[in-house]
Amino acid sequence: MNEMNVDVAVIGAGTAGLAAYRAAIAAGRSAVIIEGGPYGTTCARVGCMPSKLLIAAAEAAHATAKWDAFGIRLDGVVRIDGEAVMARVRRERDRFVGFVVRGVDSIPAGHKLRGYAKFVDDHSLTVDDHTVVTFGRAVIATGSSPAIPPMLKAAGRRLIVNDDVFEWTTLPKSVAVFGPGVIGLELGQALHRLGVRVEVFGRGGFVGPFSDPALKAYATNAFADEFPLHVDAKIARIAETAEGVRIVQEPGDGRLMNKDFEWVIAATGRTPNVRNLGLENTSLALADNGVPIFDRTTMQCGGTPVFIAGDANNDLPLLHEAADEGRIAGDNAARFPDVQPGLRREPIAVVFSDPQLATVGKRHADLAPDSFVTGEVSFEDQGRSRVMLRNKGLLHVYAEKGSGRLLGCEMMGPDVEHLAHLLAWAMQSGMTVQRALEMPFYHPVVEEGLRTALRDAAAKLSAA
């Protein structure tokens, strides 16, 4: 076995791991970054970027659906070339991955180890069967993997995870998507708009990232108007067939419905990659899901010299959060034991469906009852939204009683990624509803819908 002694050992070369490594090196510490899988982040390979490439194709195809309402006549039939669609997705995906890989290539060879790490104790680990690394501090940044419910495994060879979609060379005729969360909604709607027969199945009435009952109901109805969406599906059985997979659904009236698809896509969440790290050999306290208990302001696991960042900690599995967490973990690993809280930004999450979904700050479920008011606006009659024929959506903004401080928002509407950023900046700067209303609003823009919701919140605060 080879031996290596470093100040900081970083396990995982994804977004969080690269940020942690760079922070440790910038602080003047010796560091090694360990990776057993392919280089290239989850975002670039199977997440943010390839999914947006597929969505962009779907949006281009769907744009023609509104031409008639605008008085624009299309002579002929729009034809979707599945092979060309997926060729562009893969080609551009590989380009984005290439940027990440080139960044890894710039790291000195002596700072990189290929293989899977396993802790021996609090200050040493092995990498496969070739190297023992002794470290002063460690950063766990091992990412996550798709979670597959046991029931879906009956689909056999016809079961794939969302990661696999981006290896397709053409579009299938039909898919069943399990999980109407962020990934399931994005993929399900995009494939539907590209001519694939799609049904989306969920449990418990959950849809997207929403916890506000009004937003959940609105989103459920809006998506169900476009494609079959079963947010609380009862599935009797699933079986692989010669041509694909058969799903037997109980619609609730005593009947059984047979539904046949080419593929089943499991978009049922992701699991932190911590099970095979040998954490049982350390003094780390673990939560029920096997993730070390950590402080999200410092990324430190208890009082130990071990830190955890990115999807591996199962906190906020988003690229920008992983980058921030990796930097904080790397900084604190370098300065240990003088650990300091790092900057955690106002939470912001976006689903790139159409209409888009977003949450900012605290969600409805995070707030104490009777501690806040809700400012509301519907985009159905919002001026600019109607002009564009994109007038579908609902926005709820939450403000604290007494202080009037903006607390959070859940929303569905046209390009609300931009409204989400406005609100995140406002909340992080501590704005009240009244202060936000003093900001400029141009006319006619979708942002005027936010002003309507803020005015509603202000009136309710005055009456509270």
Image: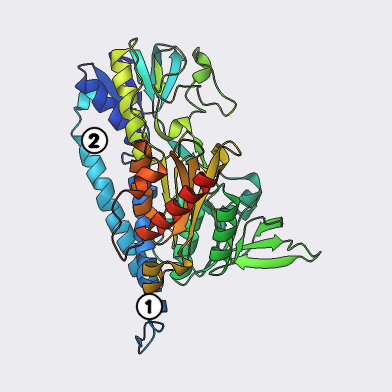
Instruction: Name the foreground residue: 31 vs 218.
Output: 218
In this view, 135 is above or below 159: above
- Identity of the amino acid at label 1? Thr
Please state the horizontal and vertical placement of residue 191, each as a whole percent of the image.
46, 65
Q: In screen coordinates, is 90 left or right of 30?
A: right
Task: Locate the C terminus and report the quarter of the image it occupies.
Answer: top right
Question: Which residue corresponds to the image point at 26% horizontal and 20% vertical from the top-left?
Answer: 31
Residue 360 seen anywhere in this rendered image of the structure: yes
- Residue 374's x, y, as percent? 52, 48
Q: Is residue 286 above or below residue 434?
A: above
Which is nearer the N-term, disc 1 or disc 2?
1
Q: Quadrant of residue 170?
A: bottom left
Quadrant of the frame with the N terminus: top left
Give the residue at mark 2.
Answer: 104
112 to 8, vertically: above or below: below
Q: How is the image coloured?
A: rainbow
Three-letter amino acid code of the residue under disc 2: Val
Which one is in front in this view, the residue at disc 1 or the one at disc 2?
Answer: 1
Circles 1, 2 touching at the beta carbon (< 8 Å): no
Question: In this view, which residue lies farthest toward the right?
Answer: 254
What residue is pinned by disc 1? 64
Image quadrant in which you'd find residue 103: top left
For marks 1 and 2, give the CA distance: 42 Å
